[in-house]
Amino acid sequence: MTTAMPKRQDINPQLKWDTNLLYNSPAEYRKTLQEYKDMVAQFEEDFKGKLIDSPTITAALKRYEECLVIDSRLMHYGFLNLDVDKMNVELAALANEYQLIFAATAPRLSFLETELGLQDEKLLKQVISEQPQWTSYLENIIRQKPHQLTADQEELLANFAPTFRQAYDNYETTKFEDMTFSNFEANGQTYQNSYVLFENDYEISHDTELRRASADSFYKTLRAYKNTTATTYLAHVKNEQIQAKLRGFDSTIDYLLFPQNISRELFDRQIDVIMKELAPHMRRFVKLMAKSHGLDKITHADLKISLPSDFNKRITPEESKQFLMDCLGVLGEDYVKMIQQAFDERWIDFAQNEGKATGGYCATLYDGPSYILLSWTGLMNEVLVLAHELGHAGHFQLAKKQSILNYEPSLYFIEAPSTANEVLTCNTLLKESDDPQFKAYLISELISRTYFHNMVTHLLEAAFQREVYTRMDKDEYLNGDILCDIKLQLLKDFWGDDFEIGEDAGLIWMRQPHYYMGLYPYTYSAGLTIGTAMAKQLEEKPEEVVATWLETLSLGASLSAQDLAQHAGVDVSTDKPLKDTISYVGSLVDQLEKLI
């Protein structure tokens, strides 16, 4: 018997997201693409070289907002459809049509921020006083002044901008179109392997033979593409390094932190404190899980297992709706209505099918739905992923109170609402149960999904990034083997000598698309630090905290990440929230030791 992934066309429509909420047909999408191209050309004609007074700047920014809203809708329609069916030539053509329009229009829009950056600071502050909805956006332009290039240089870079994502596109092509995973044998049965099957099911399976055999099969294929993937990734890093030098930053890391408006101290703190202080708790946890499974050794293929339990039953998407509405009900009636809407209007793609992107994400349109990508397994692990992505949805639906120019907060804060939902969901269930076995199961899932994923998996990726950027800035030679050595050593440093971290573990760096999105991985642990503190507050004094938390989410990018956290009652200028979070994980492991 061989398990196989179904084709997209064979999936029940109720398990697919509905992108017709954006455009009724490809014809309507194509028509809007052309209209948008004309709109941008008119924008350039009306405002280029004319941003010399407050009324003109105000008129330009209002039109610019309109352009951004339409561009977002077009981009999402082009790529959301392709993300769930990457081998579909017609969908690839639709996405390519957007890319061509983007390549033609992005340079024609780029003059706006360049010319604003060249204006006298007094003029920009005058616009801020008259149009406070753009305060954060314009203050950020003022902040960028020391790193701005000449108008001609900025325009040249803008024309090259479409090529800057080529490394990511190449990575995705290698991952989803070129990689072919061989079938493998486990327990006398033949299984098909793929990114989706491995990452969403096999890797966390409680069947040791299946889990380890799937890992052998998976990493065998990754190894065959190691050098191609390394060349792709290092080209991306070199691109960032060149831009950092052009703009006068001391390091590539400083350049990448600048848009987040976060200090190097906060970045390093997340990595160094977690590597040192969380590692002992996670080692205890994994050893407990290994003992519960009767393992005589712990390999890198065993790190993500949770507690074996009779409670680990499959949950349908429909069952998960009421489950999450109940657990997140403390956030209020409007928040629950948003969850209901996400299910009823089919914002969520639950399907597991051939050619679908891996992992999970939430992509919100400023004037539309929050689309959530999953590959639904029905396990508690996946329910927590959905709670996480609904956290992003709730955040950005609330942030629409801001201008689209002040909409997306710093990456440092971006994962706080999502991780808070995960912790809140599990802690709500823990409070409601008196069954020690169920409590042990939930704690196991909370640690293995929420804390492991955000403060181990992604944190180790952040440590890997820091090492790569540091070496590149020192002009050290890097290749696929060296990248594997860096990753392997970081894993061994974190897990210590009691774990058998084999050579294949060095290939784990190849799995993460976030490496092509700046310094994203460390922000998961930063967000979870804030999220853990907020979940605790929401549980202990909801009547005082809920309104403040929802207001914080509605502020979008109108405050810095530190100020947003402070507004919600979490002071990340100190290491206390991070150390409190690590202590909380330690207390969860303590509880597990008593329960099992």
Image (spheres, helix red, strand yellow):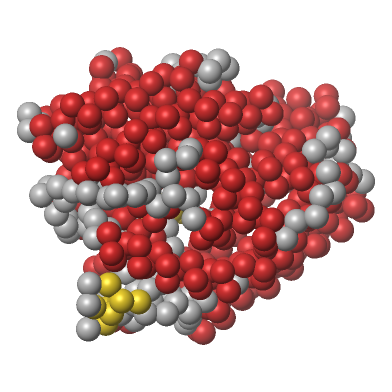
Whether residue 347 sits left or right of residue 162 in the image: it is: left
Position of residue 394 measured from the top left corner of the image (x, y, whole percent): 37, 41
Whether residue 521 sits left or right of residue 473 in the image: it is: left
Q: Residue at x 66, y 24 (%)?
A: 265
Residue 111 visible at all: no
Of the pair 352 and 19, the residue shown nearer to us: 352
Position of residue 543 measured from the top left corner of the image (x, y, whole percent): 25, 17
Whether residue 131 sits left or right of residue 538 in the image: it is: right
Q: Above or below — where is 75 with respect to 302?
A: below
Q: Residue at x 16, y 57 (%)?
A: 314
Of the pair 31 and 336, the residue shown nearer to us: 336
Q: Quadrant of residue 550?
A: top left
Whether residue 394 sits left or right of residue 403 in the image: it is: left
Q: Quadrant of residue 534?
A: top left
- Residue lying farthest to the left in this orientation: 435
Of the pair 97 and 413, the residue shown nearer to us: 413
Q: Quadrant of the N terminus?
A: bottom left
Position of residue 203 measured from the top left corner of the image (x, y, whole percent): 35, 58
